[in-house]
């Protein structure tokens, strides 16, 4: 699991350098890729992590409450980041973007770790989903840091620092999973974080990239991602 989290972290760093190559074809595929990612994350949180939290002894009401805590906590974190980033100083905004990126990567790691706590195959699927999610995010954050006046080498160093949050979050999830009494709470919390990432972070970015040739990307991509996770959940129940 930790090895996979390091691989995801490497993906987030390499995404910073994608902006240096022609991106016309990649940009055309981004809405579909992001929409499918949102569907996969949403399905993972609702169809895998949340039921698994109940299976670990958490009542349905408690699981929903802990999940809500995960969503609200991320809303609070993003609210603070956005409030501090309202300065007219572009460099200050870029520094806050780095802070938000670190927090985001830690949550990514927690989600990956929680998925591995459910099932190794599911963990790999979620890790690949997070990688797809990080490609467009990495490009966007690189643009923010460059616009903030940071040199490419410094952007790379800051990217390394932020990407370290992925294995850190995975390690935290792994440590939590080793405590049997807290597994259910950890899974429910990770479900809330996953749902937040899908609906507040990933999906809104899709709307900004839509054109005449990909207007159905949000609906079809989300549907495909959720159906895939639903089918995976059925296979898990059969086994």
Image: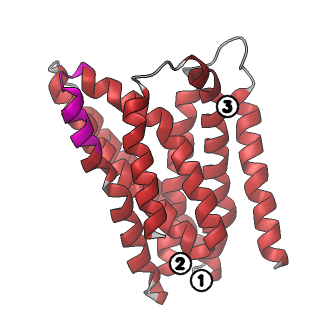
The residue that disc 3 covers is: 32
Is residue 155 located in the magenta-colored stretch of the structure? yes
- Name the disc covering residue 108, or none: none
| Residue 13 visible to an observer of this rendering | yes
Label 2 to label 3, Cα distance in Å?
33 Å
Kindly report which numbered mark, 3 or 1, lies closer to the viewer in this rendering.
3
Cβ–Cβ under 8 Å for marks 2 and 3: no
The residue that disc 1 covers is: 56
Image coords of residue 167 (percent x, y): 37, 62
- For the point 68% across and 54% down, the residue is 43
Label 1 to label 2, Cα distance in Å?
5 Å
Image coords of residue 100 (percent x, y): 30, 42
Cβ–Cβ under 8 Å for marks 1 and 2: yes
Image side of residue 82 versus residue 139, left or right: left
Q: Residue furthest top?
A: 212
Q: Earlier in the sequence, mark 3 or mark 1?
A: 3
The image quarter containing residue 32 is top right
The residue that disc 2 covers is: 184
Is residue 148 located in the magenta-colored stretch of the structure? yes
- For the point 57% across and 22% down, the residue is 27
Residue at disc 3, secondary structure: helix
Kindly report which numbered mark, 2 or 3, lies closer to the viewer in this rendering.
3
Q: Which residues are magenta?
A: 147-159
The image quarter containing residue 235 is bottom right
- For the point 77% across and 43% down, the residue is 224
Q: Earlier in the sequence, mark 1 or mark 2?
A: 1
What is the crowding at mark 3: few (fewer than 14 residues within 10 Å), some, or many (at least 20)?
A: many
In the rendered image of this protein, does residue 73 appear above or below residue 60? above
- For the point 33% across and 29% down, the residue is 142
The image quarter containing residue 35 is top right
Residue at disc 1, secondary structure: loop
């Amino acid at each position: 699991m930790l090895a996979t989290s390091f691989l995801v972290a490497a993906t987030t760093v390499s995404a910073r350098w994608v902006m240096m190559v022609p991106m016309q074809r990649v940009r055309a595929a981004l809405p579909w890729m992001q929409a499918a990612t949102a569907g996969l994350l949403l399905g993972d949180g609702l169809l895998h992590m949340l039921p698994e939290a109940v299976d670990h002894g958490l009542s349905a009401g408690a699981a929903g409450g802990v999940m809500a805590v995960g969503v609200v906590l991320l809303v609070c974190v993003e609210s603070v980041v956005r409030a501090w980033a309202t300065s007219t100083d572009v460099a200050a905004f870029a520094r806050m973007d780095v802070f938000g990126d670190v927090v985001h990567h830690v949550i990514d790691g927690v989600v990956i770790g929680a998925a591995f706590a459910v099932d190794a195959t599911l963990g790999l699927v979620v890790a690949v989903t997070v990688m797809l999610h990080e490609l467009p995010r990495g490009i966007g954050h690189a643009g923010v840091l460059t616009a903030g006046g940071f040199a490419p080498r410094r952007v790379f160093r800051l990217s390394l620092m932020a990407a370290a949050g992925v294995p850190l979050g995975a390690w935290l999830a792994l440590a939590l999973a080793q405590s049997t009494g807290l597994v259910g709470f950890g899974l429910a919390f990770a479900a809330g974080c996953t749902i937040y990432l899908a609906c507040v972070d990933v999906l809104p970015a899709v709307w900004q990239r839509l054109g005449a040739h990909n207007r159905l990307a949000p609906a079809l991509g989300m549907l495909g991602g959720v159906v895939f996770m639903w089918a995976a959940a059925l296979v898990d129940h059969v086994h």
